[in-house]
Image (spheres, helix red, strand yellow):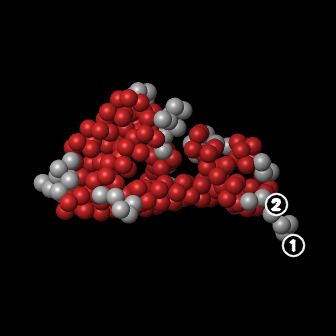
Amino acid sequence: MPRPRNFDEDTVVAAARDRFWGGGYAATSVDDLTTATGLGKGSLYGAFGDKHTLFVRALDGYCVDAMDRIEAQLRQPGVSAYDRLAGHVRATVADIAADSERRGCMIAKSSAELGAADADVDRVVGESLIRWHGYLVECIAEAQRDGTVRTDADPEALATTLLGLMRGFEALRKGGTEPAQIEAAGEQALALVAG
C-alpha cells in the first residue's frame, strides 16, 4: 500500500515551474527540482513520473494562468474594446519592462528550447498562442466596429502583428534593451492599430 502524500501537488508544481522558468528544461536537473520542491527523488518520481511530465504540467499551469489573465484583460466587461486592447498591450509591455532578471516568458522560453522537437511542449504552447491570438482578434474586430481601430486591415493580421511585436519586445528586453525603450515601442504598436 503506497504511503499517503504529505505535500500539496500544486505547491510542488509551482516550485518546479519557477525552477524550470529560471533555468530552462535542459539546465534543470532532478537534484535542482528536489531542492526547489523540498521533495526527495522517490516522492518526486512517485508523484509525477519523470522530469518531463513535471515540466509539461508546470508549463501547462503557467499557460493556463497566463491565458486566463489575458482573457480577463481582453474581455473585461464595461470597458471599450480599444481600452481593453490598449490595457492589455500596456500591461504586457509593463511586465516585460519590469523583468529585471530578464527571465522572459516561460511560453517563449519553452518553445525556443524544445519547440517542435517535443510534441507535448509544442501542443501546450500552440494551444496557448492560438487562444491568445483569438482573444486579440475578437477584441480588435469589436474595436473596428466601434471605429477605434483601423478598419483597412484584417483583424487576424492585426492580431498577429501585435502578438509578434509583444513577443519581440520580450526578446529585446532579454537582450538588454532598456525598459523605457520597450515601453515606447509598446505605444508605437498601439499607434499602428489605432483608427
2 and 1 marks in contact (CB < 8 Å): no
Rendered residue at 51%/60% (across/down): 64
Residue, far front: 78
Q: What's the residue type where badge 2 is placed?
A: Asn
**Mark 2 vs mark 1, CA separation in Å:** 15 Å
Residue, far left: 152
Rendered residue at 83%/67% (across/down): 4
Label 2, residues with CA under 10 Å away: few <14, some 14-19, many ≥20 = few
List the residue tagged with mark 1. Answer: 1
37 sits to left or right of 89: right
105 sits to left or right of 149: right
List the residue tagged with mark 2. Answer: 6
Q: Answer with the quarter of the image where residue 177 lies.
A: top left
On residue 79, the disc is: none
Task: Give the label, 2 or 1, closer to the camera.
Answer: 2
Q: Is residue 56 visible?
A: no
**SS for dot 1:** loop
Coordinates of residue 88 in the picture (x, y in percent): 38, 50
Q: Is residue 138 above or below residue 148?
A: below
